[in-house]
Image (cartoon, grey):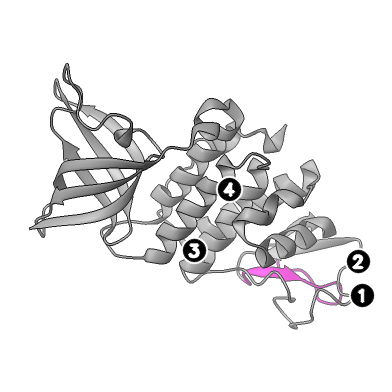
């Protein structure tokens, strides 16, 4: 059947002499693999609509039980030029795409995942963007949308609110089995990762704000790096077959 859906390009690879295979994340059908015939001919089809991170309105022939669908039309809706033109932003854009590709498998509609992907790319493309903040906020929302969200506001053991002055002192601990941080009054779990208190505060702040507003928070290198380590480990602990996100070591968040 012929279907229409908005889509963002996650991956692209050459196929044969003139075709291209894309991995898309679509609003109506989730992750999809499609082939675009004639995408690399003398007069290539659809232009920038096939580029990584491009958002387009697409038309395709979709057949159930077929892994590779046929795309017949793609009209570019948005191309994130500030991301594409900046090496640092581009690497964070790759990380956003890779984390989704690594954690979501198969065709299954999930409009929230599509919306948080789109909003992350828009925030990354904004003039005053802080790329590390955008990625961390995206991973918090990705975890939540997948049903494995982190409670950044309370102790994972005793449920003490971190806003209480005595709840966090000196350092904090993140437990993979507990799926959250522990307060100063609770012993850390054996699998805990020690973090700075500012890391907990940073994630709690990001968790309370929209993607468009995260540029207003200035994170220290330690808080940014630890936050990413926490979120990546958390995802891996819940998704055993999660693919490696190759762009992570190249982010300036660790410099």
Identify the residue shown where x is 28% and y is 62%.
28
N-terminal of the two: label 2 or label 3?
2
Residue 4 point in image, percent of width and height: 20, 55
How much space separates mark 2 and mark 3, taking CA atoms? Answer: 28 Å
Cβ–Cβ under 8 Å for marks 1 and 2:
yes
- The residue carrying mark 2 is 169
N-terminal of the two: label 3 or label 1?
1
How much space separates mark 1 and mark 4, taking CA atoms? Answer: 34 Å
N-terminal of the two: label 3 or label 4?
4
Main SS category, magenta section: loop
Foreground label between 1 and 4: 4
Residues shaded magenta: 178-191
251 relative to 57 in the view: left or right: right
Identify the residue shown where x is 51% and y is 60%.
142
- The residue carrying mark 1 is 166
Please check the rendered image and state whether residue 124 is part of the magenta-colored stretch, yes or no.
no
156 relative to 20 in the view: left or right: right
- The residue carrying mark 3 is 238
Badge 3 marks a residue whose secondary structure is: helix
């Amino acid at each position: 059947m012929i279907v229409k859906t908005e889509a963002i390009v996650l991956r692209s690879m050459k196929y044969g002499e003139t075709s291209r295979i894309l991995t898309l994340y679509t609003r109506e059908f989730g992750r999809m693999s499609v082939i675009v015939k004639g995408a690399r001919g003398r007069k290539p089809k659809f232009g920038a609509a096939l580029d990584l991170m491009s958002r387009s309105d697409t038309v395709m022939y979709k057949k159930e039980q077929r892994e590779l669908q046929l795309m017949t039309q793609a009209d570019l809706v948005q191309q994130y030029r500030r991301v594409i033109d900046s090496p640092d932003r581009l690497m964070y854009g790759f990380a956003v795409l890779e984390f989704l590709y690594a954690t979501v498998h198969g065709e299954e509609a999930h409009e929230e995942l599509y919306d948080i992907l789109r909003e992350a790319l828009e925030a990354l493309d904004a003039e005053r963007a802080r790329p590390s903040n955008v990625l961390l906020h995206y991973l918090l929302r990705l975890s939540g949308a997948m049903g494995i969200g982190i409670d950044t506001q309370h102790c994972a053991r005793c449920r003490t609110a971190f806003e209480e002055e005595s709840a966090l002192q000196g350092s904090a601990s993140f437990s993979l089995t507990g799926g959250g941080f522990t307060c100063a009054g609770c012993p850390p779990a054996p699998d805990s990762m020690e973090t700075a208190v500012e890391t907990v505060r940073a994630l709690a702040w990001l968790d309370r704000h929209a993607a468009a507003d995260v540029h207003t928070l200035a994170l220290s290198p330690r808080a940014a790096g630890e936050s990413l380590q926490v979120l990546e480990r958390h995802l891996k602990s819940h998704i055993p077959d999660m693919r490696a996100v190759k762009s992570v070591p190249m982010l300036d968040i660790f410099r």
